[in-house]
Each structure stands twice: as structure tokens, then as C-alpha cells.
Amino acid sequence: MEENRECCHKTKERSEKEYKDLINRLSRIEGQVRGIKKMVENNAYCPDILIQVSAVNAALNSFNKVLLANHIRTCVSEDIRAGKDETVDELVTTLQKLMR
């Protein structure tokens, strides 16, 4: 798993397994959001919609945990081993944004 950095654009090559897992999670979340939209269109009861929104939030948080763990295990650890201390600052900034 090699990270490509060109100019100011950062990219990440993911393994096939990691890629499929992330895409599958996002597809399920997308389906949940479409379901919520249909609930609103069909005038569903507010608490029922709110419960589904809560489920989407939980799914997004789970997605973030998986992505963050993969990022730390690969990009961050590789950069630290290579002496790129600015990666730690980037990680701290990212975590601060996630915790808003």
C-alpha cells in the first residue's frame, strides 16, 4: 500500500479488500438516506424518521472509525517511520475536525 503524493494532491492506493469494504459501507449508507427521503415524501411519523437518521449517523461514525484506523495503520505510521512529523499535525487537525 503505497501513498502517492503529487504537488498538493494526496491520494491513497487501497487494497481491493479495503476498497470494497468502504464502498459497501457507503452504498448501505446511501440506501439508508434514500429510505429516509422516501419516509419524508410519504409523510412518515417524525420519531420514525429520527430513528433512521440516528442509524445513518451511527453508520457514518462507523465508516469514519474504519477509515481512520486504516489511515493510522498505513499512511501515518509510514510517514512517522520516514521522519515526516508534519503527518502527526495533520492527524491532530483531522481528529479535531471529527470531534466538532
Image (spheres, rainbow, N blue to C red):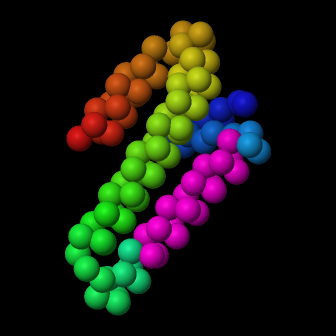
Quadrant of the image containing the N terminus:
top right
Residue plotted at (33% across, 58% down): 54
Residue 16 position within the rendered picture, expressed as x and y whole percent measured from the top left: 76, 45
Q: How many marks?
A: 0
Instruction: Give the x, y percent position of residue 86.
Output: 43, 20
Quadrant of the rendered structure where residue 98 is? top left
**What's the residue at 63%, 55% (across, down)?**
23
Magenta span has 22? yes
Magenta-drawn segment: 18-35
Q: Residue at x 60, y 12 (%)?
A: 82
Residue at the far right in the pictured view: 16
Figure check: 45 above or below 6: below
Do we see residue 23 in this rendering?
Answer: yes
Asked if 8 appears above or below 56 in the picture, the reply is above
Name the one closer to the observer, 4 or 33.
Answer: 33
Relative to residue 61, is residue 5 depicted above or below?
above
Q: Is residue 53 located in the magenta-colored stretch of the structure? A: no
Image check: 59 left or right of 47?
right
Left/right of residue 8 with respect to residue 100 in the rendered view: right
Which residue appears at 25% of the width and 79% of the height?
A: 45
Locate the C terminus and report the quarter of the image it occupies. top left
The picture quadrant where one finds residue 42 is: bottom left
Name the main secondary structure of what is drawn in magenta: helix
**Can residue 6 be seen?**
no
| Rendered location of residue 64, percent (x, y) | 46, 42
